Every structure is written in structure tokens, then in C-alpha cells.
Image (cartoon, helix red, strand yellow):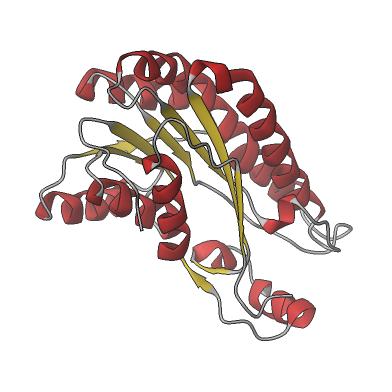
Amino acid sequence: MTTGTLENTVALVSGASSGIGRATAQHLAAAGATIALVARRADRLEEVAAKLRADGHEALVLASDLTDAAGAHDAVERTIREFGRLDTLVNAAGLMLNGPSDRSPLREWDQMVDINLRGLMYVTKAALPHLLAAAKDSPRSVADVVNISSVAGRFAAPTVAIYNATKFAVTGATEAWRQEYTTRNVRFSLIEPGRTQTELFDQKSNSDSDFTAAFGEVEPLHAEDIAEAIAYIVTNPRRVAVNEIVIRPTDQP
């Protein structure tokens, strides 16, 4: 259950065309935020925006490639031009292309680094000046960045080396940013989900079977479960900073 309101705030959500990003946009809009939706698939974003608008919420579609620094900067600047501010950033875009390291194509490693790490870095860098400004003039006196990592950002596993590397990097960067900006009222938080029912496991064949071989049959989390945790983080009063949440399915070891 959320603890406050996001009225008169603006949230930018990456990876908003599906899964955790889409669910997060819906939860934050329900809490009162105006939403900027960012992903590469414009048609999917339009579907999300249409649903939000039908429910009475304001939404901006930003079809951008965040792995390009200029594209990330443009997405943030278009949000500012349209809405005048930015109070919340949720980095939910991600890619998981696991497999035996000796047989995995190098391009898949590059894709994971580009999306999971560089894209997050680029949009965070572009957003920071606006988040700092929002923390100063917001009635809530706080702004938020929530980064979606993974339990793979805590524990390494065979055939997951590069995904592990990107998620460990996100975990480390988020904690460093938290320390850097905590006295300036920009809260950095990390969510580390276990198996979640999203398109992540559809991105490469055998992902489901590989997971089942390692952990057995697991009832996965829903994207809405993660979105609810994100909404809890960003609707807390200024005095409450939730640094890190690990969320696993009940039956995932």
C-alpha cells in the first residue's frame, strides 16, 4: 500500500512498454504523478499511454533509445519541456541474454551492457540536474531514483556472467549515488527482484528451462508486485529512505 501522494509531480519510467516498467507507470499515475513513458517501441508505449489517459491521467510518449547518450538526454529534456519538472526516475529497462560464455555471441554481451548499464547511466546523468532542482522546490522536499537490478546483482551463477556483471554494476552505482546525493534530498533506491513474470525470459530461447533446471518450478512474481514496492518507496515522506529491497518468489531458493 502506498503511503502518500504524488500529486503535482512528474515521473519518467524507462522500459515502460511492458512488464515492470508498464506496471510502475500505472501505479505511479494512480498515486497522482504525471508520467513520461520511455522505451523504443512507440506502438507499445501508445497503448500504455492510452490506458493511462482513459483513466484520467496525463502521459507523454517518448520513443527513445536510451543506449544512445543523445537519445537519453533528449528524452529527459522533452519531459522537462512538456511538464516543466522531473521528480521521479525509474530505470526499469533491461535485457537478459544468458547462456554458456564460450558459445554466447559477443553482440549479446554488448547488448546487455548497453541496455542494463549504459542506458541507465545515460538517463540518470541527464536527469540529475532536474531531480536536484525538484528536491529544492517540491512541497515533498525530495526526489527519487529507483533502479531495477536483480537478485543476479547480489549472487553470481554459471552462464549468467555478463548479466551478473551489469546488475552488480547497477547495485554498486546506486549505493554510491545514494551516498553522494542523500544530503541533497535525492533518494537512490534499488529493487532486486527474483523470477518475475515479464518478457525478460522471452528474450532468449531456453531461459525458462535453464532457470527451472537451476531452481525448480517456481511461481513467479507479477510485475505489479515490483511496481507496488516502487510506489511504496517513492511515496514515503522525505524522512524515509528505502535503500534496497530484495523481492523473491516465496518458493525461489
Quarter of the picture holding the N terminus: bottom left
Q: Is residue 101 positioned above or below 34 on the image?
A: below
Q: Which residue sits at x=51%, y=16%?
A: 184
Question: Hey, which residue is sitting farthest bottom in the picture?
Answer: 217
Q: Is residue 120 positioned above or below 95 on the image?
A: above
> Residue 205 appears in which quarter of the rendering?
bottom right
- Describe residue 179's horizontal placement relative to residue 235 as left or right: right
- Expressed as whole percent of the image width and height from the top left, the position of residue 42 reads 31, 46
Q: Which residue sits at x=43%, y=60%?
A: 19
- Expressed as whole percent of the image width and height from the top left, the position of residue 28 reads 31, 47
Question: Hey, which residue is sitting farthest front in the picture?
Answer: 239
Question: Hey, which residue is sitting farthest right in the picture?
Answer: 102
Q: Can residue 64 be seen in this view?
A: yes
> Residue 129 appears in which quarter of the rendering?
top left
- Expressed as whole percent of the image width and height from the top left, the position of residue 107 reads 71, 46
- Describe residue 99's horizontal placement relative to residue 180 as left or right: right
Q: Is residue 134 positioned above or below 100 on the image?
A: above
Q: Is residue 210 positioned above or below 108 on the image?
A: below
- Describe residue 101's horizontal placement relative to residue 130 as left or right: right
